[in-house]
Amino acid sequence: MLTIIAAIAKNNALGKDNKLIWHLPADLKRFKKVTSGHHVIMGRKTYESLGKPLPNRTNIIISRDKNYIANDCVVVHSLTDAIKAAATDNNPFILGGAEIYKQAMEVADILDLTFVHHEFDADAFFPKIDADIWKEESKVDFNADEKNKYTYSFVKYTRS
């Protein structure tokens, strides 16, 4: 199984200026719980926006730069190589960014998404979800509260 995990807005926004646009503690907590103990695959810019490897996970960074080094991470040069590097994990996760998501949509088995029910100004967007390919398996809705400014949903899709 290969899972894409992402938080996206109503207009498919992912981020702006290589940063998250919103702050949803419930999503961050869930992300940590779901991905801990697994391999996480991400592009170089996504990794650099984090500033360090995610703890309790094997961090695999995709970079076209053959000389790129990320301490305590595995560096590869294609999504195919990243998936091979995660072969010992029964469920590695794709963490982005936009170009990596676009490539991974061709090979992923599951989409584990947090939909933020708001539109944002962004410069990075999640690919369109083709209803002929992806089937919604589950959806849990949450209202905004004192910690989470926006309404949101956790939605799981499987490849049909």
Image: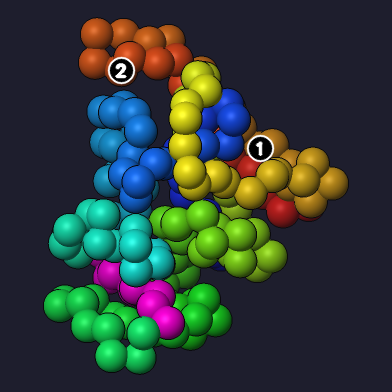
- Give the residue drawn at x 15%, y 78%: 71
Q: Which residue is mark 2?
A: 148
Residue 137 tag number: 1
Name the side, left or right, on which 141 lies relative to 45.
right
Q: Within the image, what quadrant is residue 25 found in?
A: top left
SS at circle 1: strand
Residue type beneath disc 1: Glu
Reading the chain from its start, which is encountered first: label 2 or label 1?
1
Name the side, left or right, on which 124 lies relative to 73.
right
* Circle 2 Cα neighbour tier, 10 Å, few/some/many (<14 / 14–19 / ≥20): some
> Is 80 above or below relative to 93?
below
Which x, y percent locates residue 62?
Answer: 40, 75
Is label 2 in contact with label 1 (beta carbons under 8 Å)? no
- Give the residue drawn at x 27%, y 36%: 29
> Is 109 above or below relative to 84?
above
Residue type beneath disc 2: Asn
Which range of residues does the magenta coloring cover?
57-64
Which x, y percent locates residue 41?
Answer: 40, 67
Q: Within the image, what quadrant is residue 22 found in?
A: top left
Which x, y percent locates residue 135?
Answer: 74, 42
- Give the residue drawn at x 30%, y 17%: 148
Q: Nearer the viewer, residue 116 or 44?
A: 44
Q: Is residue 155 magenta?
A: no
> Is 11 above or below relative to 75?
above
> Main SS type for the magenta part?
strand
SS at circle 2: loop
